[in-house]
Image (cartoon, rainbow, N blue to C red):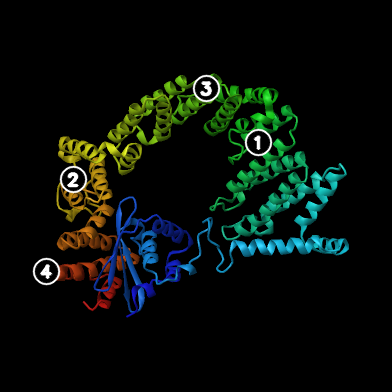
Amino acid sequence: MKPLGEVFDAATVASLAGRRVLGRGTAYLGDGRVEPAEVRGGRLEATVRGTVPYVVELWVDGGRPQWSCTCPAAEDGSFCKHAVAVGLSIAAGDESSVHAPTGQKGRSLNPGVGEGSVSGAADELAAFVGGLHPERLVEIVLDRAASDWQLRELLLAESQAARGAGVDLAAWRRRIDRAFAPNAYSRGGFVTYHEAPGWAAGIDEVIDAIGDLCDAGHHDAAARLAEHAHRCADNSIEHVDDSDGWLTGFSGRLSELHLRACLAGPPDPTDLAARLVELELGSELSGFYRCAAAYAEVLGSEGLAAFRERLEPHLERVAGGAGDDDFFDGFAVRNAMLGWALGTGDPDVLIEAHSFRQPHSDDLLEIARAFDRVGRVEEAIDWARRGLADWGDRPRQVAALREFLADKLRASGEEHAAVDLFWQAFVSAPSLSAYRRLLGEDEGTGWLGRCGGHLLNSLAQAPEAEAGIRAAPEVMFGALAPRVSEAAVALVEILLYEGRIGEAWKAACEFGARPEAWMTLARAREPDCPMDAVAVYEQAALAIIARKDAKQYQSAVDLMVRICRLAESAGKPERFAALLERTRTEHRPKRKLQSLLDAQGW
C-alpha cells in the first residue's frame, strides 16, 4: 500500500479541493491550525481548529484517497478546507506543484514562472520596442488597430484630444446599444443563463473603451456615455437571465467610471445635479445609490442646493402617497435625500433627513459617525448609546454600532465601559462569536469561567421545555430532534473551542447541542470512549437514511464503517450487528442503500 503522503500529494489535494477551497485550506495550514496527527490502522486522524475543532480522517482504499471531516461542509462528501490543511501537512514533498490561490502574495500562479522572469521579459520588450524604427512601429500599431476596435478608438480618442476635438457621441451610443442588445446572442430576444457570459464580455469591452476615453482626456464624453450605458443596463433587467449578477457588476463599474470622469473634468454642478437625480431615481440598479454623498466634492454647495431643489417635488409626491409603487418609489426618494444630507456634511441636516421614518440601528450609526466626523464626539457617543438602547433586543443588528461606541469610549479613557458593552452583548445573545469577541477585548479576565458560569446559571433557571434535551445523544438528529436553547449551543461550542471535550460532552448530554457539535464531540471521544461516539454515529446514520435522498446514502454507510470499527475495538461487535440488521430490515426497499451495504461485504 502506498504511504498516505504519496496518495495525498499536493497535486491530488489541489484536484480534490478546487482553487477556492484549496486557498482556504492552505491558509489554515499556514496559520498553524493543524494539530499533531495520529495514525491508527492506516488511518490518519488530525484535529483542525476552525470555529470549533474539527476532526479530519484520511485513509487509502484500493489505492484511492478517502477522507472524512466533522465539519458541516463535508457532510456531502466534499473535500473541505480542513481536509486540505491536513492533506498538505502530510504531502510527500510535493507542495511546489500546488498553485497558489489568486491574490496570494509571494507565489507565482504559473509553475516555473516567477516575478523575476516576468519583469525581465517586460524589460526586454521595452528595450526592443524602444529601438524600433518609427515606420516599423507605425506599421505594427496600424495593423493591430485594424482588427482591434478598442485600440483603434483609443488612438482616435488621444488624437482628437490632442487637437481639441470631441468624440462622436452618437456613434458611441449606437455602439453601446448594440452591445446591450439581446438579439446578438438570442434570436428570441432573451439572453439565457448560458448565453449571458458571452453577452457580458462584449459589454465589458465597451466599458473598458469608455474608460480609455476618460484616460485620454474626454471626461465629459466618458461621463455621459457611462450614464447612457447605465440606462441600457437598467433596461436589460427584463431580457437577461442575471443569476450571476452581471448587471449589478456593470452598474458598479459604470458608476465608478462616471465619478472618476466627473472628478477629472468637473461638469457644470447644476446640470450634474439634475442628471444624478434622474440616474438615482430612474434605475432599479444600485450604482448611483445615495450618489449625492459620493459626488459632494464635484457638486459643491451650488450643486448640492440644485440636487435638493430637483429632489423636492419627488419628496412632496412621496409624502402625499402618489405613485404606482409607493413603497419602492418612496425608498428610492428617501435614500436620495439621505445621500444629499450626507453630502452636506452637517449631522443636524442628516437627523432631519432621517425624520421621514423611525430610524433603524444603521441609521443611528450613520448619524453618530456624522457627528464624529465634525468633531462633536459627545453627541456621537449619545447617538450611539441611543441606538443600543433602542435596538438592544436585536443584538446582531447592532454589532457595528457597538464597535463604534466601544472605540469612542476607549478613546475617552472609559476602557471598562467599552468591555462591558461586549459582556452585555454576550448576556443578551450568547454565542461562540460573542465569547471570542470578549477574548479579543481582554484575554486576562477569565472569560471562560465567567461566561460558562453565566450560561449554566441561565440553563438551570430555564423551564424544562426551554432548557434543551437533558438526555443522551440518541435523539439529537432528524426531524423530531428537540429544540436546543441558545445558551446550550453557546456553552457546548465554547467548551469545544477551548478543548474541554469532557465538559462539552457532559453539557451536550444534559442540555443538548447542534448536530455538527455532536459529530465533533463523537470524533474527539473515539479514542477513550468509543461507545459514546458509536451512539452519536448511529443516530446520524439513521437520520441520513431517513431523509430518503439516495445521494446521501454513501455518507450513512461511511458512518456505519466507522461504527463497525469502533464497536469491534470496544469488544461490542453485537452493537454494530444490531444496527446493520435494523438498517437491512427497515430499509429493505431502498435498493441503492442495500447495494452499498453489500459492497462492504456485510
**Residue 78 screen position, x and y as percent:** 38, 63
Q: CA distance from mark 3 to mark 1?
A: 33 Å
**Residue 541 screen position, x and y as percent:** 24, 63
In the displayed structure, does residue 320 sit left or right of residue 301?
left
Q: Which residue is mark 3?
A: 375
Q: CA distance from mark 3 to mark 4?
A: 72 Å
Residue at the location (52% across, 22% down)? 375
The amino acid type found where label 2 is placed reads Phe
Residue 498 visible from this viewpoint: yes
Q: Which residue is mark 4?
A: 572
The amino acid type found where label 4 is placed reads Lys
**Residue 134 screen position, x and y as percent:** 87, 61
Residue 585 visible from this viewpoint: no
In the displayed structure, does residue 352 sit left or right of residue 552?
right
Foreground: 447 or 181?
447
Q: Secondary structure at mark 4?
A: loop
Q: Which callout, 1 or 2, points at the residue further toward the start of the chain?
A: 1
Work out whether 265 lies above or below 101. Answer: above
Q: Which callout, 4 or 2, points at the residue further toward the start of the chain?
A: 2
Q: Are marks 4 and 2 in contact (CB under 8 Å)?
A: no
**Residue 337 screen position, x and y as percent:** 58, 26
The amino acid type found where label 1 is placed reads Leu
Work out whether 60 lies above or below 119. Answer: below
Q: Which residue is mark 2?
A: 511
Q: Which callout, 3 or 4, points at the residue further toward the start of the chain?
A: 3
Q: Are marks 2 and 3 in contact (CB under 8 Å)?
A: no
Q: Are marks 4 and 1 in contact (CB under 8 Å)?
A: no
Kindly identify which numbered label has been placed on residue 279.
1
